[in-house]
Image (tube, rainbow, N blue to C red):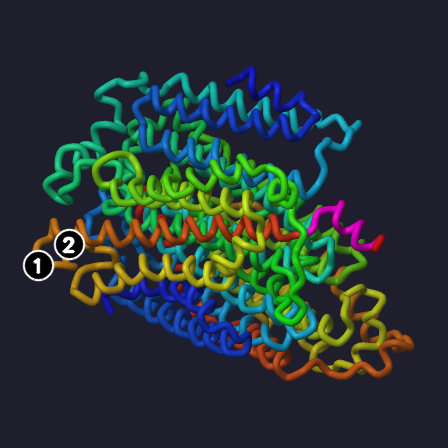
Amino acid sequence: MVGVVVAIIWMKDLIAVVMLLGIYGLLTASFFMAMDAVDVAFTEASVGAGISTLLLLVAIAKTKRKEHPSRHKPLLALLVVVITGGLLIYGTYDMPIFGMADAPAHTHVAQRYIEDSYDEIGIPNIVTSVLSSYRGFDTFGEVVVIFTAGLGIIGLLSTVNGTGTRKKLPTINDSIEDQHIVLRIVGKILIPFILLFALYVQFHGEYGPGGGFQAGVIFGAGIILYAMLFGMDIARRVISQSLIQLIAAFGVLLYGAVGVVSFLNGGTFLDYNVLLENPVAGQHLGILLIELGVGMTVASVIIIIFFNFAGRKGPQQISDDLGA
Amino acid sequence: MAHLPILQVILPLLAAPLCLFLKRPKLVWLFACVVTALTFTISVLLVQQVTSTGVISYELGGWAPPWGIEYRIDALNAFVIMVVSGLSAVVLLAARTSLENELSSNRQTYFYALYLLSLTGMLGILATGDAFNVFVFLEISSLSAYALIAMGKDRRALWASYQYLIMGTIGATFILIGIGLMYQMTGTLNMQDLAERLPEVAQTRTVFVSFAFVVVGVCLKLALFPLHLWLPNAYAYAPSIVTAMLAATSTKVAIYLLIRFTFTVFGLSFSFTTLPLNILFLVLGLLGVFVASTSAIYQQNVKHIFAYSSIAQVGYMIVGISVGTAAGLSASLMHIFNHALMKGALFLALAGVMYRLGNVQLKSFQGLGRQMPLTMAAIVVGGLSLIGVPLTVGFISKWYLVVAMIENGWWPVAILILFGSLLAIIYLWRVVEVAYFRAPNKDNESVKEAPLGILIPTWILVLANVYFGVDTRINVQIAQMAAENLFGVAP
């Protein structure tokens, strides 16, 4: 990992940098895996190694490949980084030893999660119980964070709604569209499986690693792959921008609605116990619904981000327009 | 009634996605105004409830803390919540008129949704009693703030927003590292629980480092000198409404966080006795007052002048905290309330100028005293309040701050604070001089008074500046109660 990071700093070719970042993400995921944090590893693999690499590549396609040569030497920044790193290492001296069973992190709150969560919530994946029930409000917040990001992207990048003059947008994918028939056929075979896998991850989060976040990312990646292979225009015809926004908004509302219904039923916000007669069944239903909301919002926001980036003209195309 | 704490936050939260369903900007604006008005009403009810019955705890998801997340409303955060939601509601009233000239209509729906989300984020930070939940809502408020700032008409808004994004992300990451280290040492994320368990491990280096990260991260957010560099451009190039909202609310939320972490979570004895934080705050706060006020004197863009003045005002609040007495803290809290009123009024008045002139360069203010009498009068009253003239709210907080210094025997500091007010007179005088004592230049001769849509909200805030300067029951008493509560908990 250190080697990769050093390489990222030295490299001037941005595509190589993005690839290395992807590798870094994958290494981080493996590292989490080695520490037995499967859910975190899964998220890191799909977000760090997967979707962010893809988005960065699109961003490069829209701008330039080479870094601007800069003569400025960021010594002050280096100093700040060294101090921060030094502090972090200094802080590790008094930490409990890794994996020690009686470390405070294991003996206080976590103990109840480990011992009682199955009886209280009835699902075997403790991570899911903590995320979506004990600390469900944090997860709600995270979904809103993602929703905010999507809104910000549309608010900033959305071009004037061209309902009248709808001309074909030139996209980065035109070349792929015309030439790479093999890619398209392989893609066509793979995409249904990717979407299916996303759904599996979505509904299997209670038992194995997975859940709305990862499923949303994978689902979004499937759609993006489709858009890349078949061109933005066709993809837009399948999924319209305004529909996808409403789906993103609906995901947040669904999550919130579960919370509101639970306090209308006499509990507190997001108290799934009161959703049904049987508290454990209520927990099941609540988690299923909120994970669905999470998945919808995450997938649509990722597609929104991609559409808005890829739909913009790159510097090349702008100069073409000016020339024509 | 029992659900007030959560309604406070989820009302604007759920309203934001609903904005996308309404689509038409005018309708969305109306809807958002109703929502913020309701949010403000809830906050007033909460303040009443807290002052009469004491701390309210709300268990989210039905899980008792520390297993679940807890909303915990005491006098301190009820007070700041009221300030934030009140100011956001009034500023939003001016949004429709002000945005006409500053944002294309197809982006306005997103603007209002992001505005509500930004409000949600801040209220979430304020209401929660859980350290990690703070981080989540911090992200909501910051992300929406970056997007709102970048919507500015000026292309430089993008760069300003990017700078803020980098600094803000570093700040948020530092806070997250700090919270992570705390969790590692105590096994809990609930603030109340942390406060109980931290003293046992207070002497470890890990806790020391986590405290350092949290404080530096929060100080980045609140633009404490010398971590303020992101602020002036972010305020200057954002849409006027966003400037007014952020200036009135966002640094206040960060100051609240600082108070919460130093006083409640780590405890006064750890923050101020084990570590020399009071000296550090005192020095940086005073430096902030002087450096920022001096910079304000040399600015040519009026938004820049008031942005630097905001950094100076943050300096005063930090000085108040650094004393480490209930009197000092309550002076800082009053200043949160009062500064929100002043800067809200001033930046809304600037929104009026922006609407008519299209810019807020000092040189374009020539003769505006005659062309836009009400707007300029608003700037004068807001300015007097900023200086701290009697009968305005500014006087109240300066008075209590100086008294707190003197009680503590810090005479030189008290004198320096008064000297800082003199600098405020200089930079405000520059605006007044140009507006009232110069003949209008050719472009300005046909300029009319700002439209009512902006004038009315501006004057609501201006009159509030005067009203709360005379009738001090709300700002002074609740601030004192909040401060005394904090000192009651921490021995």
Depth order, front residue of B462/B326: B462
Depth order, front residue of A260/B22: B22
Q: Which residue is pictured at 18% across the width and 60% down the height?
A: A267
CB contact under 8 Å: marks 2 and 1: yes
Q: Which residue is pictured at 63% across the width and 26% down the height?
A: A16
Secondary structure of the residue carrying numbered label 1: loop
Secondary structure of the residue carrying numbered label 2: helix
Depth order, front residue of A286/B432: A286
Say which mark, if any, is on residue A269: none
Chain holding disc 2: A
Instruction: Work out whether residue B308 can be spotted.
Output: yes
Q: The N terminus of chain B appears in which quarter of the rendering?
A: bottom left
Q: Which residue is pictured at 57% across the width and 51% down the height?
A: A232
Mark 2 residue type: Gly
Residue topped by disc 2: A282
Start and end of the magenta stretch?
Answer: A313-322
Instruction: Residue B93: give x, y in percent of width and height.
Output: 54, 76
Q: How many marks?
A: 2
Q: Which residue is pictured at 10% across the width and 41% down the height?
A: A119
Mark 1 residue type: Glu
Instruction: Work out whether residue B401 can be spotted.
Output: no
- Can you say whether B266 is above or below B223 in the image? above
Residue topped by disc 1: A277
Residue at the extreme left: A278
Tags 2 and 1 on a common chain: yes
> Main SS type for the magenta part?
helix
Rate crowding at label 1 as few (under 14), some (14 to 19) or many (20 or more) other CA atoms within 10 Å. Answer: few
